Amino acid sequence: MGIAAAAALLGAAWDAAALLVWAAAVAALAGGLRWWVGSLRSGVTVHVAFEPARVFLGETAQVRVRIENRRRLPVPIVRVSLPLPEGLLAESDPAPTAFRGHRLRLSLNGLSEATFTLPVFPKERGEFWLDTVTVDLSDPFDLAPVRREVQVPTPLLAMPRARGEAAAAVARALPFGRPRAGARLFEDREHFAWVRDYEPGDPMRQVHWRASAHAGTLQTKRFEPTRSAEVLLAIDLSMGEPFWRAVDGDSAEAAIAWTASLALRAIDAGWRTGVVANTHLRRGRGPLRVRPSTAIGHEAALFAALARMPSQPTTDLAPVLREVGRGLTRRSSVVVVSWSPGNALRHEMEGLRRRGIDVAHVDPGRKDEGLAS
């Protein structure tokens, strides 16, 4: 617009009609581009997301990009640049010098939308956040492109690959297929049912103090009966005791993969499934623990922990199992996934067995489907 104004002044001073026409054309072009840019900012929306948001290693995920043009005018040039973080590949076998990501160029008609999916291949387990996805919208002459930087709100979780042969062996030993053959009913402490008068021998921790104050006599909490059983998967990422003596990343990854297989089998069979490990998900928060539960979203939280957990141990598994084991009951089962359990870990496993808790040891290094005891 400044150039057009200057040319118009010169054309008026020199009485040059051609210069005046040129100035008018430049002013019209600048005004049209300014209007074009403004309409693009409000008339075109871009959405980017992973589908699905959780995959197992070896599976292909997709990035879904949807561009909607709510204007009547078309968008002749649309350029999409989607860089991928380290650990995600755009192709299963990319060239060494290839761009790590996707680039697209297309056009949009008026009042239309374009939706396309771009494959991504995780090469390791973990949590992957996309960097800013860049979308350039431009006019027919590519004079005034408008850049959109889209943030992806959720990451891609690449979970460890499940190993079906490991689950089959332990399923026969517990078995996973039918949670505890006995018909005994247990109280589910997560579902309060009613209160009754206190009877001698009732634990004081089950006294409902508010109801007791209202009734004038002690009242004991009762819970809904259940036959559901629970299994705790304990992962030992070290190769013995103490944990710093022998640490191997590949062995730890194998233990995590076997645990993912066992978790899938147990959840499918209806077991309340939890996971503990001798590593920290977040520094300063204590060892990783996902307690058995049937709450909505528990399965997603469990596999998210398996995807995010580091492969380096930060403590021995024995003290972790000792603390968590205090809350286990006779309807609980424990599966210890360990390459070489030390004396302290074996002592904790025997202590759980003496309390009537089923304990199985899975050795990822054994060829006979991993079942050690």
Image (cartoon, rainbow, N blue to C red):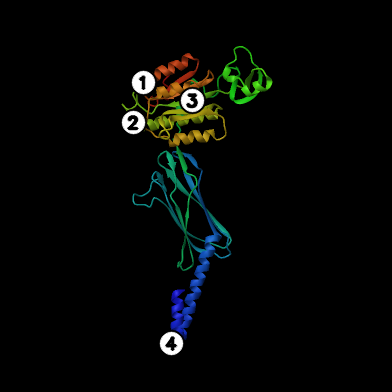
Of marks 4 and 2, the one in the foreground: 4
Per the image, the residue denoted by label 4 is 14
The numbered mark, 1 or 2, whose residue comes first in the sequence reads: 2
- The image quadrant of residue 16 is bottom left
Residue placed farthest to the left in the image? Answer: 245
> Is 239 situated above or below 23?
above
- Name the spot of residue 317 as percent of width and height, x first: 40, 24
Per the image, the residue denoted by label 2 is 248
The numbered mark, 3 or 2, whose residue comes first in the sequence reads: 3
Secondary structure of the residue carrying numbered label 1: loop
Judge from the rendering whether residue 212 lies leftward or rightward of residue 293; answer left or right: right
**Type of amino acid under label 2:** Asp
Per the image, the residue denoted by label 3 is 232
> Is 329 situated above or below 96?
above
- Name the spot of residue 329 as percent of width and height, x first: 53, 19
Which quadrant of the figure contains the C terminus? top left
**Type of amino acid under label 3:** Leu
**Type of amino acid under label 4:** Trp
Secondary structure of the residue carrying numbered label 3: strand
- The image quadrant of residue 268 is top right
CA gap between label 1 and label 2 equals 16 Å
Per the image, the residue denoted by label 1 is 342
- Mark 2 nearby-residue class (10 Å; few <14, some 14–19, many ≥20): few
- Mark 1 nearby-residue class (10 Å; few <14, some 14–19, many ≥20): some
Residue at image coords 43%, 49%: 131
CA gap between label 3 and label 1 equals 19 Å
Residue placed farthest to the right in the image? Answer: 215
